Image: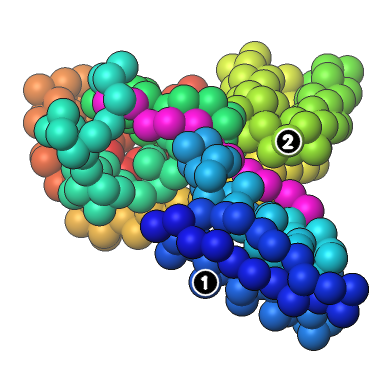
Amino acid sequence: MKTRLALQADSGALAFLGILNWLLATALFVALMLATGAAQAASPVCGGQDLVFPHHENEIAQSEAVTGKTFVKYWLHNGFININNHKMSKSAGNFFTIRDIASKYKYDVIRFFILSSHYRSPINFSDELLEASGNALERIRNCVESINYLLGADDSRLNEKLESSQINSIDLFESVKIAKTEFSRAMDDDLNTADAIAAVFDLVRDVNSCIKDGNFLFDMLKDAKSVIIELCGVLGIVAEVIPDIPAEVITMAEERVKAKSEKNYALADDLRKKIRNMGYEILDTKEGYRITGK
C-alpha cells in the first residue's frame, strides 16, 4: 500500500513519500529507542538481499527522517537459497524449513553447512553437500578425540617417544599461532566464516600429520586441542563430544583384543560387528583400540 506520510518538524512541514508496509513497526520501534537515547543505532540488522529495496531503504528513510540519527550501523544481507542449484520457492514445490531438514540431518550439521559459505553468497542445499558437511564436522571431532585418547594414554614407550620428538614440536606450535591469526583475520573480513573454518581445518590437518608421524608433545597437543575448541566455539560449533560408552561395549572391545592376540580373527570380527550394531565403531591404532560413536 502506498501512503503519503507527513512528518511535522520544528522547522516546518516535512513531506515524505514512502511505501509503508509491515516493516514500519520495526522502524518505529527503533526510532523510539533512538529518540529516547535507549540505543545509538540498531546493529546488526539481518535479512535477505531482496530486502535491501524497498524494505530496508524505506526503514532508513522513515527512521532517520524522524530522529536525524543513523538508523543502522551494520547491515547483513544474506544470499539467496537454492535447492539442487534451483531457486527455492513455494511455486516450484521445493520449499522447506530448517525443521524439515532437521528431520534428516542434525542441527549441528546444518549449522556447519551454512557457516561453510560466506553469508552474502548464495547457498545451495543438497543431500550431497549436507552429507559432506557432516563428514567435515566429524573430521574436526575425530581430531579432538584422537588428542584426548593420546593425552589419556598410559604407555611408557609412548611417553618416551613424545619426549624425544621435541625437535619437530615447534611446527605444531606455529600452526596453532597461524590458525588463530587466520581465523581472526577471516572473521574481521565481513564475518567470512568459510575462511575461518578453513583456518581450523589447516590446524586439524597439521595435528593429524603430527600424530601420524609421532612428532608431538603432550603440551603441544593440549594447546592445539584448546585452540580448536575455542575457535569452533566462536562459531557455535561443538568440537568435543565425549561419548558415553556402555560397559558392555567396553567389555566386548577387551574381548576382541584378547581374541586377536589368540589369532581368533573370526571371533574378533564378530565382536566388531556386534559393537557396530550397538551404534559404536572400534578403531585400531598403533597405541591400541579406540571406541567412537557412529
Q: Is residue 80 magenta?
A: yes
Residue type, label 1: Ala
- Colour mode of the rendering: rainbow
Viewer-closest of 163 and 12: 12
For label 1, the crowd category at 10 Å Cα-Cα, with few meaning under 14, some 14 to 19 and many 20 or more, is few
Q: Is residue 169 above or below residue 242?
A: above
The magenta span reads 73-83
Q: What residue is rendered at 48% in x and 37% in y?
A: 50
Task: Judge the density around disc 2: few (<14), some (14-19), many (≥20) Cα neighbours within 10 Å.
Answer: few
Q: Position of residue 67 (x, y in %)?
A: 79, 71
Left or right position of 242 against 246: right
The mark closer to the camera, 1 or 2, is: 1
Q: Where is residue 289 in the image (x, y as percent from the top left)?
A: 39, 34
Say which residue label 2 marks. Answer: 190
Q: What residue do we see at 53% from left, 44% from top? A: 54
Q: Which quadrant of the structure image shows residue 225?
A: top right
On the question of residue 139 being in view, the answer is no
Work out which residue is located at the far front of the displayed protein and give it. Answer: 12
User: In the rendered image, is residue 84 in sight?
Assistant: yes
Whether the magenta-drawn stretch holds residue 143 is answered as no
Whole-percent x and y of residue 273? 13, 33
| Residue at 31% in and 55% down | 245
Q: Label 2, secondary structure: give it.
A: loop
Question: Mainly helix, strand or loop, the magenta region?
Answer: strand
Front-most of residues 25 and 189? 25
Residue identified by numbered label 1: 25
Foreground residue among 229 and 211: 229
